[in-house]
């Protein structure tokens, strides 16, 4: 009886240690840089039209740098948001403060195109403050 438990524990240890070794050699989840800029546009380095492309169920970290636009009146000090209405209930709704914040995300399991928008009235250009998330199979 005890012997069997020991074998199970040993197997569990090997499994978890194996995972740890893999993780240690890994660079971790992909970091996706986005700027929510002072001109009330989303920007991604080297992209004219910013698009985030992820595989279904991919885990990543959004690293969003926000700069204050012309207006903001949110009581909590948020100057923009990064919001996908269709995925709000899965956490894709981030209130942005001045500076850089990191948000872990998981891509949805359905491929498709999703619109990212800002829901803080941030000034001129706010109505067009949108970008895309493309989820590939
Ligand atoms: Cu806005």
Image: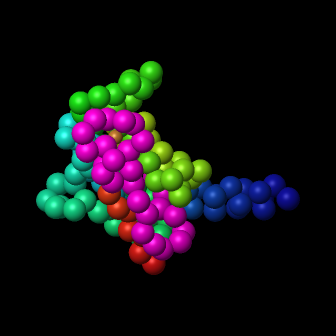
Residue closest to the far bottom = 137
Residue at image point 53% right, 56% down: 87
User: Quick check: which quadrant has ligand 1?
Assistant: top left
> Dividing the picture into quarters, in which one does residue 81 lie?
top left
Side (left or right) of 27 relative to 5: left
Farthest residue, direction top: 75
Q: Is residue 49 above or below residue 127?
A: below
Front residue (pair 40, 54): 40
Which of 65/114 is in front? 114
**Drawn side of residue 126 relative to residue 43, left or right:** right
* Left-right relation of 13 to 117: right
Figure label count: 0
Picture coordinates of residue 27, whole percent (x, y): 31, 55
User: Is residue 52 depicted above or below 99 in this figure?
Assistant: below
Quadrant where the image shows the C terminus? bottom left
Which residue is painted at 38% across and 68% down in the image?
134
Residue 107 magenta: yes
Assess whether residue 10 is covered by the magenta stretch: no
Q: Position of residue 68 (x, y in %)?
A: 25, 31
User: Residue 118: image x %, image y %?
Assistant: 38, 45
Along the line of sight, the residue nearer the viewer: 8 or 24: 24
In the rendered image, residue 51, in percent from the top left (x then y), is placed at 29, 63
Looking at the image, which residue sits at the far right?
Answer: 1
Which image quadrant for residue 15? bottom right
- Which residues are drawn in magenta? 103-130
Q: Residue at x 16, y 61 (%)?
A: 48
Figure quadrant of the N terminus: bottom right
Residue 121 visible in the shown view: yes
Asked if residue 23 shows in the view, the reply is: no
* Residue 59, quarter of picture: bottom left
């Amino acid at each position: 009886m005890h012997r069997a438990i020991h074998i199970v524990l040993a197997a569990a240890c090997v499994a978890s240690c194996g995972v740890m070794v893999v993780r240690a050699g890994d660079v971790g989840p992909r970091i996706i840089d986005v700027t929510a800029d002072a001109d009330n546009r989303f920007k991604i380095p080297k992209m004219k039209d910013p698009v985030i492309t992820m595989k279904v169920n991919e885990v990543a970290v959004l690293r969003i740098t926000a700069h204050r636009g012309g207006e903001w009146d949110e009581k909590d000090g948020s100057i923009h948001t990064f919001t996908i209405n269709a995925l709000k209930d899965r956490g894709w709704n981030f209130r942005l403060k001045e500076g850089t914040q990191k948000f872990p995300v998981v891509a949805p399991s359905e491929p498709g195109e999703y619109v990212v928008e800002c829901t803080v009235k941030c000034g001129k250009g706010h109505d067009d403050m949108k970008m895309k998330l493309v989820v590939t199979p």
